[in-house]
Amino acid sequence: MSFSDVKPHAVSHDAVPPEPAAFPRSRLPVSPRLSVAALASLRYLGARPVPSILDAGTARFVTSGRVAIALALREMGVGAGDAVLVPSYHCASMIEPVIWAGATPVFYRIRPDTSVDLDDIAAKIDGRTRVLMATNYFGFHQPLAALRTLCDARGIQLLEDCAHSFLGEHQGRPLGSFGDYAIASSMKFFPVYEGGCLVSSRHPLDAVRLQSAGLGFEAKVVLNTVEDGFAYGRLPVLRALLAVPMMAKNALWGRIKATRHGAVQALAPGSSDGGFGFDPAWLTKRSSVFSRALVKIVSRRRMGELRRRNYQRLQTALAGLPGCRPLFNTLPDGVYPWVFPLLCDEPQVLFRGLKQDGVPVIRFGEYLWPGVDATVCATSVDLSRRVLQFPCHQELRKDELDWMIEQVRQHVRRGAPGVSS
Ligand SMILES: *Cc1c(COP(=O)(O)O)cnc(C)c1O
């Protein structure tokens, strides 16, 4: 038994239920793992910092992005009888807090390039609408100035979902500074086990009071972060040093679990065993000291540069393959992508083949909220089904990236009609 069995929230990337046992473990880390380079990257010292949501305003560090969404809704006074405009391309963790707040999610359309359909939004604002939630998908920003203008003109508030855009700028301003409130998910960008933040460039956050989730939680976060790093050979020296204490810890944990099942379960509210992955108990909990320290220490310049470089490698290597194309044609300045999204003609076959061979594939938006179908937004249904995402995070090594690219090329070619491999 490992401490990894307990996690404050569902998988950070999406609302995808645990992988079927049929798929082997991914051969490379799907999200950033702790490395020595992440902490001590002298090359990037003194370099111009990459703008991030933390530059947008006051911040509160919580344990996940979904908790930050719930807090934002609470700060905006959203309650029963209110409507919140949400994108029809989404993951469950964006919608669950709206339901928790007692409000009705109203789904607006998005376009094939993932930008919001402003006309549809304008048409759907009515007397009940309090908030518009907009997501900078995969790190690519929305027409934020236009959204700001629309919200101001119609007297509603803007919630900027920066879960995919911890880093980035638009019109000389950091992403996260256009909304009344903005949220991010630290786990998607940093080598941390838990973490999200609520930011506001326009309102004080004094009413958001947080407390430590306790020593057990603090310890668990450190151990899991370090252990997750070991899993992909990131911290070999530390691993050797800690081999014995870790074994002792796992043995002890196994004993505790065996004897006190119920008590240990309580450490994992809203865990990832599927279902409703949002637990309001975490609304009052501060992110761990360890996660907050890492978010401060890890070089954002390194993270941003390497993400762009890896993304561009994927773009160059995977453009022009039969049966798929990059979702975005270019990587504009100021975009520091979360993942590399690939639009595929035969996503199911490809997904299964890749997973079987241990390739990390992410499917943000795979499951849409009940009722969101082609009559609501055919484009969202299409993106939900056809966009597969590949990691481009800063901790991928060149050999890992090359291996992943080769796997994707082979699988895509195999699946393409009339092409033999
Ligand atoms: C992951 C995600 C969230 C929620 O973040 P968590 O940290 O996983 O709770 C919110 N919005 C989007 C677009 C996401 O992908």
Image: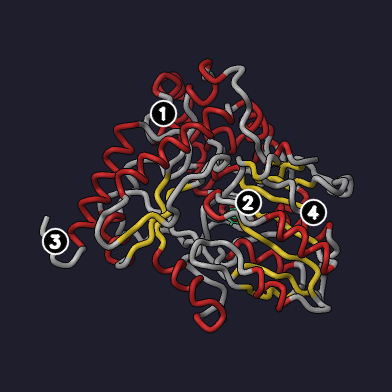
Image-quarter location of ligand 1: bottom right
Rounded to the nearest angstrom, the CA distance separating label 2 from label 4 is 40 Å
Q: Which residue is mark 2?
A: 263
Q: Looking at this view, name the residue that lies furthest to the bottom.
A: 375
Q: Nearer the viewer, mark 3 or mark 2?
A: 3
Circle 1 SS class: loop
Q: Nearer the viewer, mark 2 or mark 1?
A: 1
Residue 419 is marked as: 3
Residue at (73% x, 65% y) in the render:
132
* Amino acid at dot 2: Ala
Q: Which residue is mark 1?
A: 234
| Residue 28 position (above or below residue 46) | below
Picture colour scheme: secondary structure
Circle 1 residues within 10 Å: few <14, some 14–19, many ≥20: many
Give the mark nearer the N terminus: 3 vs 1.
1
Rounded to the nearest angstrom, the CA distance separating label 3 from label 1 is 38 Å
